[in-house]
Image (cartoon, helix red, strand yellow):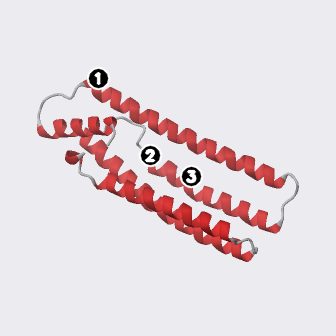
Amino acid sequence: MTIKEHDWNSLTRVWQSSSDEVATATLSRLIAAERRRLAATVLGEAVTVGAFVALSWLAMRDGLAVWETVWLTTLWLFTAVAAPFAWWNRRGAWSSMIESVAEFERRRTARRRRTLRFSCALFIAEVITVSIQLAWFDRFSALTMWTLVAMTIAVSLWGIWMKRRIDVPPAEM
């Protein structure tokens, strides 16, 4: 648990258990930290899409083989699915508290759960699609298989960690 999460959880408990006012400075600091995190996430997504544009240009500059065309189409189709989900899932996250710290925490937890489910489903779809393409174009090798296995293990570990993090009640964090 990070200090920021501890602060949010402390504020949630104070907000729910007493009529005392929550320190405005602490609340403002937490909201500012959440906005910085969201801005960094959006910047990371923009950089990723920019890298996809650069990869696409590099692949297309000398002409495309059939497998490259299929790969680029797949890349942009999955991007076209993931980007709108990310935007939709963050709706309302930029505004400060709606009703209370508890309501903010509830919405943030719901966003994290949707992100976890969507990310795992998208990853499974990507692995299946890429495996089929690699086999179709006779490019499936031991290296690609082990790369997919390593990525699956990494995503699985991330999913387990994220699920545990999401499922911890605020009072226990």
Give me the disc on residue 36.
none
Q: Which one is earlier in the sequence, the residue at label 2 or at label 1?
A: 1
Q: Residue at x 43, y 34 (%)?
A: 35
In the displayed structure, would residue 2 be above or below residue 159? above
Give SS at disc 2: loop
Give how far across and how far down residue 8 sits, in percent. 28, 37
Quadrant occupied by the C terminus: top left
What residue is disc 3 on?
Answer: 83
Q: Residue at x 24, y 43 (%)?
A: 102
Please count the marks in the image. 3
Q: CA distance from mark 2 to mark 3?
A: 13 Å
Q: Is residue 21 left or right of residue 34?
A: left
Q: Give neighbour class at mark 2: few <14, some 14-19, many 20+ (Cα, 10 Å).
A: few
Give how far across and how far down residue 47 sits, in percent. 62, 42
Res. 31 in view = yes
Residue type marked 2: Arg
Res. 126 in view = no
Q: Nearer the viewer, residue 106 or 166?
A: 166
Residue type marked 3: Ala
Give me the disc on residue 91.
2
Q: Give neighbour class at mark 1: few <14, some 14-19, many 20+ (Cα, 10 Å).
A: few
Give SS at disc 3: helix
What residue is disc 1 on?
Answer: 25
